[in-house]
Amino acid sequence: MVFTAPYERAEYHPAEITPHGPEGHPSESHGLYDFYDDLPPWQNVTGKDTTVILAQNTEITSLLQRHNRETTYTIAFEHPMQWDGEEHVKDDQFLPLMEAAPDQIVAFSAW
């Protein structure tokens, strides 16, 4: 489970401390979600009104519903799409849990 924050990229300037002093290395740029290769399309947005949309009666549904009133979000995702033959359909390995509006998913599970 990943708790999200707005997407950001940062520039790093690594250096190695050697017996002769610091030696710089090429700079690197990393994004907050670089660890997740299948990050769906997103946008940094902030809000408070959310709806639990997971229909299953599970512990995660109860947890989300219990905390829904005080939930805020700072990023929203689109449901990723995939091809099923010649039809473009929603990826069934992506499970929206909460949304701020239709197609603004603020919590999801993926496998």
Image: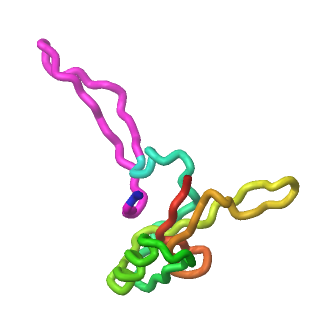
- The magenta segment is 3-30
Q: Quadrant of the N terminus?
A: bottom left
Between 85 and 73, the one lying in front of the other is 85
The residue sitting at 40% across, 41% down in the picture is 29
27 within the magenta span:
yes
Position of residue 39 in the picture relative to residue 27 (left or right): right
The answer to whether residue 64 is left or right of residue 18 is right
Q: Position of residue 56 (x, y in %)?
A: 55, 75
Q: Is residue 36 left or right of residue 102?
A: left
Q: Residue at x 48, y 48 (%)?
A: 36
- 52 to the left or right of 16: right
Identify the residue shown where x is 40% and y is 73%: 73
**Rendered view: 76 above or below 29:** below
Image position, residue 85 (x, y; %)? 86, 53
Q: Residue at x 32, y 83 (%)?
A: 70
User: Can you name the residue that lies furthest to the top here?
Assistant: 19
